Image: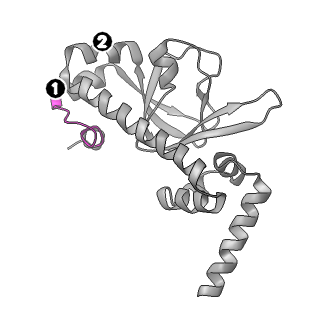
Amino acid sequence: MHRNLTFLNSFSFISEDTFSKLAAISTFKKVNSGVQLAKEGEQPTKLYMLLTGVVRAYLGDEKGKEYNKNFFMAPSFVGSYTALIKREPSKLVYETLTDCKVYEIDYSSFMKLCETDICVSNLYNRVLEHLFIKHESRHLDLISMDATQRYLKLNKEIPELEVLVPQYQIAAYLSVTPVQLSRIRKKLKEEEGISS
């Protein structure tokens, strides 16, 4: 079975016929690191199936400080969903942190397909459920965990993140400064040395 079909089936059953319909509205692209897939203040029209690489969603303030809202690791769906659904400018930037391979999907074509193919509609609902659960979990972590606990959880969820993403990006995601993250990492290494 095609690995992309396997990924889609992890959300909801997708037949070979439906997979062909999705392929017809998708364009394969290689995207360099540092490319903005969705820009703040612009209305997006595309969503992406991330095949390889890492993408972040972030909000910038007027002083140039960036707040990472999310990291997306392949395979996953990436897009400024609120802006797509509400047909309004994106409040977030979605930027590739590494070279990526994606399928770019026209959102309006995807939604038309949802109206005619129950498998696509079910897929869309499952993806939105997945995103909601992830969003709620992130908010609960920010409320109930300290920075060290959030760092440990992030490393458990995405073990390769430290290799792929600069430390200052991880710090921004954890809502700490790079210096604070460095202290957390140092303390954990010291504790690891004591327990060995």
- Amino acid type of the residue that numbered disc 1 sits on in the rendered structure: Asp
Q: Nearer the viewer, residue 147 or 65?
A: 147
Q: Residue shown at 60%/59% (left/top)?
A: 151
| Residue at far front of view | 144
Total numbered badges shown on the rendered structure: 2
Kindly identify which numbered label has been placed on residue 112: 2
Label 2 secondary element = helix
| Residue at far right of view | 63
Q: Principal SS element in the magenta part?
A: loop
Q: Is residue 11 magenta?
A: yes
Inter-mark Cα distance, 1 to 2: 16 Å
Q: For label 2, count other residues whose C-alpha is less than 10 Å away and answer few (under 14), some (14-19) or many (20+).
A: few
**Residue 163: percent from the left, percent from the top?**
60, 58
Location of the N terminus (image quadrant): top left
Judge left or right: residue 136 versus residue 22: right
Tell me if residue 42 comes above or below residue 101 in the rendering.
above
Find residue 2 and report its image quarter.
top left
Judge left or right: residue 183 versus residue 23: right
Label 1 secondary element = helix
Q: Residue shown at 44%/29% (left/top)?
A: 48
In this figure, which residue is indicated by the disc labeled 1? 17
Q: Is residue 149 magenta?
A: no
